Amino acid sequence: MRRKQSGTIYYYRNYTDDFVESACQDKRLPKDYRWVHQNFFYRLISTVLYGLALIFALIYCKLVLRIHVENRKVMKAAGKTGCFLYGNHTQPMGDVFGPTLYCFPMRICTIASPSNLGIPIIGRLLPMLGGLFIPDSMGQMKKFMEAVRYHIEKKRCIVIYPEAHVWPWCTFIRPFPATAFRFPVQYHVPAFCMTTTYQKQKHGKKPKIVVYMDGPFFADPGKNKREQQMELHDKIYDCMKSRSQDSTCEYVRYQKEKHAPAGDILSER
C-alpha cells in the first residue's frame, strides 16, 4: 500500500535507540521496592486514581488523539481468565492510557521500564495505576513474577510493549524477542495484540489513528515451553506486521543511518 511521506525524518542506528527519554532515564528500583500492596488505603487510592485515569483516557484518546478502535469485542472473553496484551510502541501518552479503554471493564497493568518513574507528576502515580516495573536484579525477579501471577489471578489484562522503546508515529513493526511471551505460556492464559496504525485524513496534517485488536492466540500445549513462546511470538508478530500494512501515512519517517552496524536486529530464535 502506498504511503504519503512526511518531511520529518528520524535517523536510527539500531532498534534500541530512544527517541523519547524521561527525566531519569537510568532510574533503578530501590532494593525494597514492592509490586503488590495490600494496604487498604493504598488500594482505595489506587482504585480512585484508576477511575480518574479512565476519564482522562476517554478525553485524551477520543477527543485529542481521536483514536478509533477496531475489533474491540475480541477482548470480552479475556475477562474470564485474565490475559496478556502485546502492542507496538508508538504513542508516549496514548500507549499509557489507551489500553484502559480498549480493555474496559477489565483492569490493566503494564510492564514497563523503571525510567518511566521519572516522568514528571504522572511517574510517581504509575505504580498505583498498574505499572509493573521491570526489576534490576535477579533477587527482585521473584517478587516481580509473584506480582504478575497476582494480577492474572485477579483476571486482569497485563499489557506488554515488546519493542520496548517508544518510536512516535512509527508505521512499521520493529523486531522483538520471544522472551516476553513466556508469561501466557507459564500462566496458561490467552494472548492478544493491538496494532496502532496511521492513516491519511482529508483534513489536518496528523494522520488518523486506528488501533486493531486481535486474538486470542494460543500455543500448542504439546510443544515444550520454548517452542510455545516462539509460536506465540511468530503468530503475534505476523499479525501485527500484517495489520501495520493498513498505515497509509508517515507523519514521521524513520531511516537507518548509512554507517549503522548491520547486526542490530533483535532475534531469539
Image: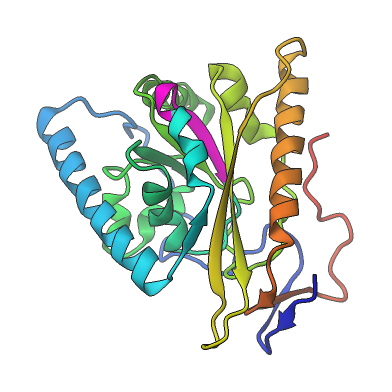
Q: Is residue 107 visible?
A: yes
Q: Position of residue 131 (x, y in %)?
A: 37, 43
Q: Give me the residue at 58% from left, 32% from top.
A: 191
Q: How is the image coloured?
A: rainbow
Quadrant where the N terminus sits is bottom right
Taking depth in this image into account, of 23 and 148 the one nearest to the observer is 148
Instruction: Report the residue at 70% width, 59% height from top.
Output: 244
Determine whether, in the image, residue 14 is placed left or right of residue 180.
right
In the displayed structure image, the side of residue 78 where residue 56 appears, left or right: left
For the point 51% across and 64% down, which residue is it? 91
Q: Is residue 210 rendered to the left or right of residue 57?
A: right
Q: Is residue 150 above or below residue 18?
A: above
Residue most extreme to the left: 41
Work out which quarter of the rendered image holds the C terminus and state it. Answer: top right
Q: Residue at x 54, y 73 (%)?
A: 208
Asked if residue 53 lies in the magenta stretch, the reply is no
Instruction: Return the residue nearer the eye: 33 or 111.
Output: 111
Can residue 135 be seen in the rendering of this structure? Answer: no
Q: Give x and y (percent) for residue 33.
A: 33, 34
Residue 198 lies in what quarter of the image?
bottom right
Q: Does 80 lie within the magenta span?
A: yes
Q: Which residues are magenta?
A: 79-86
Nearest the viewer among 21 and 164 is 164
Seen in the picture, residue 21 relative to 230 is either above or below; the reply is below
Residue positioned most to the top: 222
Q: Tell me where residue 152 sits by quadrant.
A: top left
Residue 245 to residue 269: above or below = below
- Image position, residue 214 (x, y; %): 60, 42
Q: Nearer the viewer, residue 144 or 57?
A: 57
Residue 242: % across, % down: 75, 52
